[in-house]
Image (cartoon, rainbow, N blue to C red):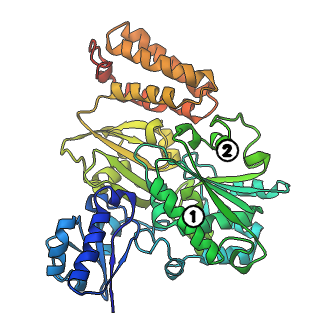
Amino acid sequence: MSAKVYVPGDSAALSVGADGVAAAIGEEARRRGLDVQIVRNGSRGLFWLEPLVEIETPAGRLAYGPIEAGDVASLFDAHFLSGRPHAKALGRIDEHPYLKRQQRLLFARCGVADPLSIEDYRAHGGLKGLERALAIGPQAIVEEVLASGLRGRGGAGFPCGIKWRTVAATAADQKYVVCNADEGDSGTFADRMILEGDPFALIEGMAIAAVAVGATKGFVYIRSEYPHAFAKFNAALAAARKAGLLGHSVLGSSHGFDIETRLGAGAYICGEETSLLESLEGKRGEVRAKPPLPAISGLFGKPTAMNNVLTLASTPWILTHGGKAYADYGMGRSRGTQPFQLAGNVKHGGLVELAFGATIRTLVEDFGGGTRSGRPIRAVQVGGPLGAYFPQSLLDTPLDYEAMLEAKGMLGHGGIVVFDDTVNLARQARFAFEFCAKESCGKCTPCRIGSTRGFETIDKIVAGENAEANIALVRDLCTVMTDASLCALGGLTPLPVLSALDHFAEDFAPRPKRLAAE
């Protein structure tokens, strides 16, 4: 009987040599005459331990990491195929504190199952949600999603069930399901991990959405910087069609549904839903004025159920276990779990799925282990490049939609970027404006011009030019951008700027000729 060894094929693991480790294990096994089956699974999200090698034993999956190709011979010498001790042995991976303290609903299979095996997906609970959806019908599906309290995990936090109900109630000869996989926020990688580590969850979720709203066609728009995810998801689509999960008859039902992928071209603005739709239609990625909403007039003017990867991939669990079971997690109007993504200057970067309500401090200190540099934490940015910077005094803020809004921040896609005490927040505020200026689609003046004037004015502040008057000007500019921008790019850029001004005012003290040069 062959030994089953798991070596992640996830981009994070590939970036630190996972392909070389997998090749070395295969070669060493052949040299020693051992029968080894290597499975290229997804990552579990413990990035500081990648490449993480696991061996399947009667006692459970035992892990070793981080492993380099040069460690492989010593693994075999130590008889790791039998789970024997080694200097890099981590024990049962599901008992690791980083994983054991999480509530993994959406990511329960990621890093566990073979991402391209329908059989493995079924063995780990896959397709039960779709089977139930086909059995109960469109209206009951929508009611289950409404009962779950699931909100858009892409950042807007709009109730998923209301969006689906709107699409379902809108009469049309064609409807679409569109998945926004243009994950462009700094410090985020959860969408990519699903695309590479559990792609059938997204396919199943999109099929559930299609049955709920009456759609027969779906599109997944994947950012150009994700070539491995694009290839892996396309391979999963081929396997899904072969297994009857997609096509003229979804799992033998009367409902037909198929999915196509589209690769973006590197525009951050295409993460905004209407710009994404313009791009899908072959046009320049540019924001549409709303109304009409995409749920009523979306792709090619047809009703479109548009959600991001994490939202759609959450629905199989909801349909399998029930909306109430999902709503039992979380707090207030933020129900279920959120995959938080720890990045930046943090010791233990990775993915942490928790019920809403955990604090920022819990994430960055208990899970992240503080800064990688060992210096004190000075600021934590939550919600991507348009998210607010939180000082030490606000690290006990709960991570849920309403609490973050009350603290003048946003949860966004769940990205958390940590900075130590060497960070300069005036420079970060300038970067927010500069980022907006570079990524703006140019359609509205507040975003296009306001962002440029913003970083120019911050340069004047730190150069000591009428600092007080120019700070007031920046605040006025932020008000205009918030109130008058067509979309969230211009409308949310003020969040990081104002949080830097409010909490780190000392960084805006004049330092002639330094900021622009740095």
- Which residue is rendered at x = 41% and y = 66% of the image? 42
- Which residue is rendered at x = 38% and y = 6% of the image? 466
| Residues at discs 1 and 2 in contact (Cβ within 8 Å) | no
Label 1: how many Cα within 10 Å (few below 14, some 14–19, many 20+) = many
Tell me the number on the disc at residue 277.
2
Disc 1 residue type? Leu
Tell me the number on the disc at residue 434.
none
Residue 453 point in image, percent of width and height: 49, 16
- Which residue is rendered at x = 54% and y = 48% of the image? 182
Disc 2 residue type? Leu
Circle 1 — which element?
helix
In the picture, the quarter occupied by the C terminus is top left
Q: Is residue 156 left or right of residue 283?
A: left
N-terminal of the pair, mark 1 or mark 2, is 1
- Which residue is rendered at x = 68% and y = 42% of the image? 282
Could you tell me if residue 423 is visible in this image?
Answer: yes
- The quarter of the picture where residue 40 lies is bottom left
Q: Nearer the viewer, residue 96 or 254?
A: 254
Q: Is residue 84 above or below residue 185?
A: below
In the picture, the quarter occupied by the N terminus is bottom left
- Badge count: 2
Could you tell me if residue 502 is visible in this image?
Answer: no
Q: Is residue 146 above or below residue 276?
A: below
Marks 1/2: CA–CA distance: 19 Å
Residue 354 point in image, percent of width and height: 43, 60
Label 2: how many Cα within 10 Å (few below 14, some 14–19, many 20+) = many
Residue 10 point in image, percent of width and height: 39, 62
Circle 2 — which element?
helix
Tell me the number on the disc at residue 202.
1
